[in-house]
Each structure stands twice: as C-alpha cells, then as structure tokens.
Image (cartoon, helix red, strand yellow):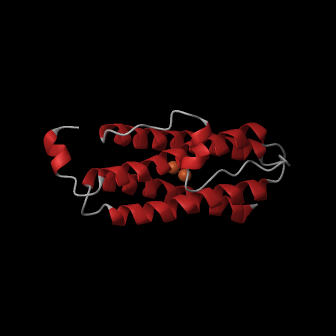
C-alpha cells in the first residue's frame, strides 16, 4: 500500500486486519459448508437445492478472495495454516446434517451462517464508515450479498 493510501486510514490497521481475517475464515468456512452440502445432499429436492448451494458456495469463495486482497493490501497475512481457519473464524463451522435428506436442517444451518455474517458485517460497515473507506465499502458489498442470500433461503424454506 502506498503512502497516501496509508495516510487516509484513520483506523488501527492491525484491528482492520484482524476483522478481515475473521471475515476471510468465515467466508472460507461458509464456502466449504455449502459446497460439502451440495455434494452430500440427497432426496426429493436435492436437484433443486444443489445448484443454489454451489452458486452461493462460489460467491462465498469470492468474498474470501476480496477479504484476502484487502488483508494483503494492508500488509497483513492470510490464514495459511488450515488448522487456524476455525480458530480465526467468528461464526464457526456447521457441518451438513448427517442425514443427507434433512433439507430443513441443512437450510436452517445455512441461514445461521448467513445471519451471523449479516450481524458481523453490519457492525463492520458502521465501524469503518469514517475511518477506512475501502474496508467500509468491502463490508457493504459483502453485507448486500448476504442479505440477498438470507432472503433466498428464507423463501426456499417457506416452500418446503
Ligand atoms: Fe459471504
Ligand atoms: Fe452468503
């Protein structure tokens, strides 16, 4: 990051990196949760739900990439060790249900991840509004996507 870019950040850069690392881990774990669910799912609605899970899984991976880019821009280091992903995460990881036909549980768990992200990103949008505009905008983008995701799953759940 260049001199002026560094000067315009009024936030504590270590704290920004730490919030972005949490985001990076959460997004990566959501990516894996949805992707694994898409492989594992069976039963009557599986063919409908699988492509939605795969699409959102890829969206979460793109979110992780955005977080990674900003972490590195700020001079930080992404989570290189797989073991540390879970420890770094704020929302944790929910494995897909043991029963691959339990679509209700699967979707409720996806909604838990989405709602946790929405709460965290809302806080982050506020936190960095005045102190780090680039990070603020990154969180706004992510928040907007997760809000759409939540709505999509709520609609699907209502029709099950
Ligand atoms: Fe995401
Ligand atoms: Fe999402």
Outermost residue on the left side: it is 4
| Residue 37, picture quadrant | top right
Q: Where, quadrant-wise, is the N terminus in this rendering? A: top left
Along the line of sight, the residue nearer the viewer: 81 or 121 = 81
In this rendering, is residue 150 above or below 38?
below
Q: Does residue 24 appear to the left or right of 41 in the view shown? A: left
In this rendering, is residue 39 above or below 149?
above
Residue at position x 30%, y 50% in the image: 13
Along the line of sight, the residue nearer the viewer: 9 or 38 = 9
| Residue 11, picture quadrant | bottom left
Across and down, in percent, residue 20 comes to 42, 49
Residue at position x 48%, y 42% in the image: 64
Q: Where, quadrant-wise, is the C terminus in this rendering? A: bottom right
Outermost residue on the top side: it is 80
Q: Does residue 119 appear to the left or right of 39 in the view shown? A: left
Q: How many marks?
A: 0
Along the line of sight, the residue nearer the viewer: 135 or 54 = 135
Across and down, in percent, residue 71 comes to 37, 42
Across and down, in percent, residue 113 comes to 61, 56
Q: Does residue 101 appear to the left or right of 126 in the view shown? A: right
Residue at position x 31%, y 60% in the image: 128
Across and down, in percent, residue 112 comes to 64, 61
In this rendering, is residue 8 above or below 123?
above
């Amino acid at each position: 990051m260049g001199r002026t870019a560094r000067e315009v950040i009024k936030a504590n850069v270590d704290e920004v990196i730490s919030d972005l690392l949490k985001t990076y881990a959460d997004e990566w774990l959501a990516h894996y949760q949805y992707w694994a669910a898409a492989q594992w799912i069976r039963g009557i609605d599986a063919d409908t739900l699988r492509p939605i899970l795969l699409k959102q899984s890829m969206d979460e991976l793109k979110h992780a990439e955005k977080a990674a880019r900003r972490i590195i821009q700020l001079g930080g280091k992404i989570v290189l060790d797989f073991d540390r992903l879970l420890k770094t995460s704020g929302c944790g990881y929910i494995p897909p249900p043991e029963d691959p036909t339990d679509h209700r549980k699967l979707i409720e768990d996806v909604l838990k991840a989405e709602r946790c992200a929405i709460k965290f990103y809302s806080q982050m949008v506020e936190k960095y509004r005045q102190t780090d505009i680039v990070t603020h905008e990154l969180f706004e983008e992510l928040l907007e996507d997760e809000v759409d995701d939540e709505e999509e799953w709520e609609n699907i759940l209502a029709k099950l």
